[in-house]
Image (cartoon, helix red, strand yellow):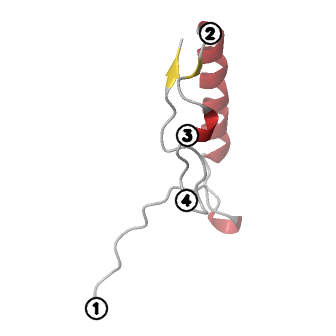
Amino acid sequence: MTRPPPAQHMTFGYGAHFCLGARLARLEVTTVLSVLLAEFPALELAVPASQVDWRKNALVTGPKGLPVRW
C-alpha cells in the first residue's frame, strides 16, 4: 500500500485542526497590503478586472496572478 500524493492546497483548516498561525498570517497580509497601498497610491490593475484569472479550487480562492502597474 502506498500513500496518496500530498494535497496541493493550502488552508488554515477547521475545528480541532485549525492552524495556530492563521491569525498571524491574516494580520501579515493586512499589514503588507496597507503598506503597499500607502507606498504606491497609484497602484492599479494592469488589465481589466474581468481578465484576472481565478483559481477554480473551492478550498482556496483568489487570483492566480494579479498584474498591476503604478
Q: Are marks 4 and 3 in contact (CB under 8 Å)?
A: no
Under circle 4, the secondary element is: loop
In the rendering, at what x and y percent does residue 34 appear?
Answer: 67, 19
Under circle 3, the secondary element is: loop
Cα gap from disc 2 to disc 4, whole angstroms: 30 Å
Q: Earlier in the sequence, mark 1 or mark 3?
A: 1
Point out the frontmost of discs 1 and 3: 3
Residue visible at 35% across and 78% down? 4
Point out the frontmost of discs 3 and 2: 3
Point out the frontmost of discs 4 and 1: 4
- Which residue is tagged 1? 1
Q: Which mark is residue 52?
A: 3
Residue ranking furthest to the bottom = 1
Instruction: Please tell me in which quadrant of the rendered image residue 63 appears.
Output: top right
Q: Earlier in the sequence, mark 2 or mark 1?
A: 1
In the rendering, at what x and y percent does residue 31 appear?
Answer: 65, 24
- The kind of residue on which mark 3 rests is Val
Q: Which mark is residue 42?
A: 2
Q: Earlier in the sequence, mark 3 or mark 2?
A: 2
In the picture, the quarter occupied by the C terminus is: top right
Cα gap from disc 3 to disc 2, whole angstroms: 19 Å
- Which residue is tagged 4? 56
Give the camera-side residue of 39 and 4: 39
Point out the frontmost of discs 2 and 1: 2
Cα gap from disc 2 to disc 1, whole angstroms: 56 Å
Under circle 1, the secondary element is: loop
